Image (cartoon, grey):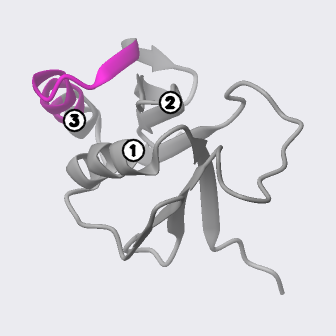
Amino acid sequence: MLEPNLIILYVADPGTSAVFYERLLGREPDASFPTYVAFKLYNGLTLGLWSLAAKNFVSSGTGHRTELAFMVESDHVVDQLYEKWIREEVRIEQEPVVAVFGRTFVALDPDGHRIRVCTPG
């Protein structure tokens, strides 16, 4: 059976994005190259940051049509992370609200990728 084990975000500068995600995740990358940086997450998933300028990069897609989502255990944790990220000057696209699935907010990484924090619905 196939199980997804890697999410790749296409970024302008992997170094800049790596610093952002290192701060956000509280850990250093597991692999770092000029055009690619990877963070192994505790659940076995890997987050890859791949340069738009990498040799052999091909994509006909544009815009940010996906979200990297972190489900947390309570509304309180949603609010704690929101306040922490505000203090760390993370760009916020959507302030905390109650959606159909629960409390949530959306932040943006340096390339404008959406990062959602929410409670499981």
Q: Nearer the viewer, residue 15 or 28?
A: 15
Q: Position of residue 95 (x, y in %)?
A: 35, 12
Residue in the picture at 30% in, 43% down? 20
Give the residue type that dot 1 points to. Ser
Is residue 115 one of those drawn in magenta?
no
Q: Which residue is mark 3?
A: 81
* Element type where label 2 sits in the image: loop
Q: CA distance from mark 3 to mark 2?
A: 20 Å
Report x, y in % for residue 32.
Answer: 40, 69
Q: Secondary structure at mark 1?
A: helix
Of the residues shown, which amino acid type is indicated by label 3?
A: Leu
Q: Which residue is mark 2?
A: 111
Nearer to us of marks 1 and 3 is: 1
Residue at the front extreme of this rendering: 55
> Does residue 88 belong to the magenta stretch?
yes
Neighbourhood count class around disc 1 (C-alpha, 10 Å): few under 14, some 14–19, many 20 upward: many
- In the image, what residue occupies the spot 50% across and 43% down? 69
The secondary element bearing badge 3 is classed as: helix
